[in-house]
Image (cartoon, helix red, strand yellow):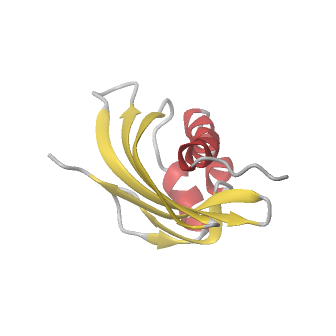
């Protein structure tokens, strides 16, 4: 019998890997948390695919950290989960930046990966 993970646990599994790679300033490891065709929208123009994700995080300052809190989840299909989060990005040389993050994670084979990533600031 296969146990189905909760939506929040699925998101935590993916986002903990993402956070660990962000905190370690490992852009290729961050990108490995995404699907090959991921739509990625940080605070700069959007990109599609892992190369764009890696380039975005490579350009981030050393010492960048991420702390997240899951606000809402929805199971869109057996292999698709939507998450809405609050993320605080910490910096060594300026105040932290709090953003809202929407993600769609998809099960690809036996792994869950981010297929859509959308950051917004609600100042």
Foreground of the two, 48 or 112: 112
Of residues 113 and 32, which is closer to you in this image?
Answer: 113
The quadrant in which residue 50 appears is: bottom right
Front residue (pair 69, 38): 69
Residue pictured at 58% horizontal, 41% vertical? 12
The x and y percentages for residue 115 are: 56, 66
Q: Is residue 10 left or right of residue 116?
A: right
In the rendering, at what x and y percent does residue 78 appear?
A: 63, 66
| 12 relative to 106, above or below | above
Q: Position of residue 113 (x, y in %)?
A: 64, 59
Q: Residue furthest top?
A: 92
Image location (x, y in percent) of residue 122? 18, 49
Count of residue discs: 0
Q: Is residue 11 left or right of residue 100?
A: right
Q: Is residue 68 left or right of residue 34?
A: left
Q: Residue at x 67, y 57 (%)?
A: 112
Q: Is residue 26 left or right of residue 66?
A: right
Q: Residue at x 48, y 32 (%)?
A: 65
- Point 62% across, 40% down: residue: 21
| Residue placed furthest toward the left | 123
Q: Which residue, as the protein is rendered here, is positioned at the far right?
A: 1
């Amino acid at each position: 019998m296969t146990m189905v993970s909760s939506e929040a646990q699925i998101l935590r599994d993916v986002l903990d890997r993402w956070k660990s790679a962000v905190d370690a300033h490992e852009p290729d490891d961050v990108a490995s948390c995404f699907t090959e065709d991921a739509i990625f929208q940080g605070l700069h123009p959007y990109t599609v695919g892992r190369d764009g994700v890696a380039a975005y995080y490579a350009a981030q300052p050393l010492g960048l950290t991420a702390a997240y809190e899951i606000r809402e989840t929805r199971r869109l299909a057996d292999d698709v989960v939507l998450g809405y989060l609050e993320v605080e990005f910490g910096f060594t040389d300026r105040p932290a930046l709090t953003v809202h993050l929407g993600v769609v994670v998809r099960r690809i084979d036996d792994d869950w990966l981010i297929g859509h990533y959308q950051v917004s600031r609600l100042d």
